[in-house]
Amino acid sequence: MKRLSIPPRENWEQRLAAIGFEFHSIDGQPYWTEDACYRFDSEQIDELETATQALHDMSLELVDRVVERGDYERLGLNLHASALVEQSWRAGERALYGRMDLSYDGRQPPKLLEYNADTPTALFEASVVQWFWLQDQRSGRDQFNSIHEKLVKAWNEIGLASPRVHFASVHEALEDRVTCEYLRDTCVQAGFETVALDITDVGWNGRAFTDLDERPIAQLFKLYPWEWMLVEAFGEHLHKAPTRWIEPAWKMLLSNKAVLPLLWQWFPGHPNLLPASNSPDTLSGPLVRKPRLGREGQDTQIFESRLLLPKRDGDQVDDWIYQRLHELPDFGGRRPVIGSWIIGDEAAGIGIREDDGPITRNTSRFVPHLF
């Protein structure tokens, strides 16, 4: 695994705009990296694929255990949320996609930092944008990237009951809108009729959720977190609506970082896991404190000494989890995190974001890869 400096493509901004990549720069700063890429060998790609599949399989086993035991307290789920989880899991509702964030240097086993299982983004750039980059820059090389093909295939495999699928996101959020539109396009390619909505346009007629034409929403892909859905005005109707949600409600378990201590408890010492706990007292060495429901590095903190940790009251259960610090690899001051995609139930490809600091945030840059 190496970070290579390469010359940018001529007129690269126009090339990106031509394929619909509207947020290649954010607030005047480049988000897409055109002058560098990461190079792997085939054995390293195999290792990433194997680790991703193993972590996903363990995650599904964890969901089954939690549902069977009703062990929702450590995940902070109330009765309403846990009922939705059980209903969707026992109904066998299949998931479409998810992204695992891994730390990997090409030498040591990949380590799971977290599982973005409900509303992961950076999908369009991983699936489409870096593939076109590869054709322009290194057409003779390969890329760990079957994301698009697997998405089109997955729409016909997740058990949809009708030919129409609605798609909802926050349209004023550009990245969310582009991601949702890309997924809608893959659904069209799979042969379905689709309808785009802003999440605020989802209505309730007393019996079902409806669109702007008052048509019932039988199936809705929502790029909108479940924890937000639950506190919306329509949240009280979620349990009785006949709508099939994508992602399903059981993804509330895996998108919650409190799943990390459970994974470590049930699969202790697994080479792709980091020690994690609900209490810092059970871990040694420097720690990372993460909010259970944080995103894009929000409120994540590193504590080199536990003496610096905020005081806790006895055995209180709070909204934080703790993970042993595993420093990201350093490539000349750039620290990459590998977003490894699961489509359906299969490892499907990677996208890489890098930051100048030790925590990957929403300002991190996307860097293409090849092998």
Image (spheres, helix red, strand yellow):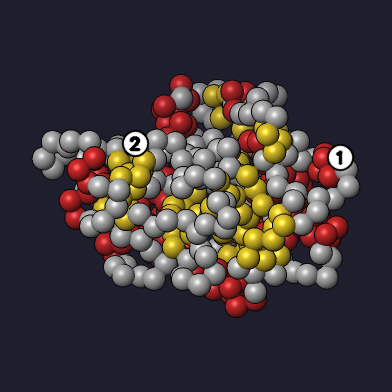
Q: Residue 245's spot in the image, x, y percent?
A: 54, 43
**For mark 1, what is the residue?**
14
Residue 294 visible to an observer of this rendering:
yes
Instruction: Please give the name of the residue rendered at 50% of the width and 54% of the height, measured from the top-left corner.
Output: 101
26 sits to left or right of 58: right
Residue at the spot 22% in from the left edge and 36% down from the top edge: 310
Residue closest to the far bottom: 43
Q: Position of residue 31 (x, y in %)?
A: 67, 40
Residue 64 seen in the figure: no
For residue 295, side relative to residue 128 (left or right): left
Task: Tell me what residue is drawn at x 39 percent, y 35 percent.
Answer: 299
Identify the residue under disc 2: 80
45 or 64: nearer the eye? 45
Mark 1, Cα crowd under 10 Å, few <14 / some 14-19 / many 20+, is few
In the rendered view, tell whether residue 249 sits above or below residue 213.
Answer: below
Q: Which amino acid does label 1 sit on?
A: Gln
